[in-house]
Image: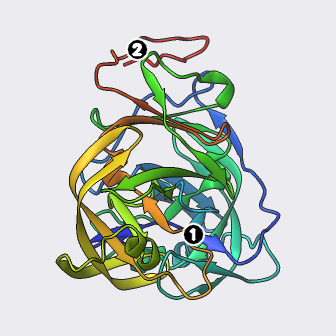
Amino acid sequence: MLAGVGAAGFLVVRHELNWPTPRISFARDGWSGWLDLPQSGGLIALSARVAGRLGGRTVQAVLDSGAQYSAIDGDLAASLALPAATPLPMVAFGVSGSPSLTRAVSLDVDLGAFALKGLRAATLELGQLTGLTRQPFQLLLGRDVLRTLVLEADFPAGRVAVFAPARWSPPAGAVAAPTRPRNGGLLVPVRIEAAPPVEVLLDTGATGALALSEAVAQAAGLLDGRPLRRGPAVTLGGVSEDGLALAREVEFAGHRIRDLEVQIYKPARHAPAPGGLLGLGVLGRFRMALDLPGGRLFLIGPETPPPGPQPRRPTRLES
């Protein structure tokens, strides 16, 4: 979800596509170095330079493990005259709202510490939608990018780094969380109060803590007559009115979180949406490492000391 009670960068398309993997180059030896996260907004957003036939533009790029493919604002793509990458249109879905008919363009992206060549991105109304949020962005880097990287986000310290997979291994003190790969993403189990655990999609593009479909929320006991308030939410499918219920306890990867507000959404009709999303409202409590190529997620406790520089193999990062 993206704004109001929450926001989600979840994005899938109707059919499996031959979506190329961009070529990635680093300014350092296989990693980006630590990059500062924005002070507000909550998303993993980095400054990026996008170049086209009609010049270039500096934009905010969000790293989104909930998005099957990368996406770019359609008006921006048109203003830069980015070349078309697919001959046929495709149908894109957010977690709720209406599907969008979209095409894809190809582009190169320079993020300073690392660069992407040959990125393919679906064109969506990102500017119009994310303009309603605290952290507007015009470029979404999805699992087509993240499946080639390890993402380490130290939310308490306000910093993030990305690595070539061969240049990374878990730091001392890192604890692997239970995960299950699915469609290129990661499902993680969460337990809501006394209900059996449910699997939800790990979504670094969701600003909320936990979002569940109506059916999953019902099975978890959240629609048991407890107070339910409503509020606006922005997803890549548009603006919706979602419910919010207070869960007395939610357990994730051995951590118990009390009095967590859970967003309840109605999935888009015919959309292959997940039963739930675990977002940055929970993940942002940790230093985490997302190894999507290896299908792994690590949580690194606050007791872990900041690692020192490793010029040859930065498995322990420089502070």
Residue at 60% across / 80% down in the picture? 271
Tag 1 secondary structure: loop
Above or below, 125 against 290 in this view is below
Residue designated by label 1:
11
Which amino acid type is shown beneath numbered disc 1? Answer: Leu
Q: Quadrant of residue 55?
A: bottom right
Q: Which mark is residue 186?
A: none
Q: Residue at x 33, y 70 (%)?
A: 221
Q: Residue 126 vs residue 286: left or right?
A: right
Q: Choose between 281 and 78: the one closer to the eye.
A: 281
Q: How many marks?
A: 2
User: Which residue is nearer to you in this view: 222 or 13?
Assistant: 222
Q: Residues within 10 Å of mark 2 (few under 14, many from 20)?
A: some
* Among the 4 quarters of the image, the one containing residue 156: top left
Image position of 193 (left or right of 279): left
Q: Position of residue 229 (x, y in %)?
A: 19, 80
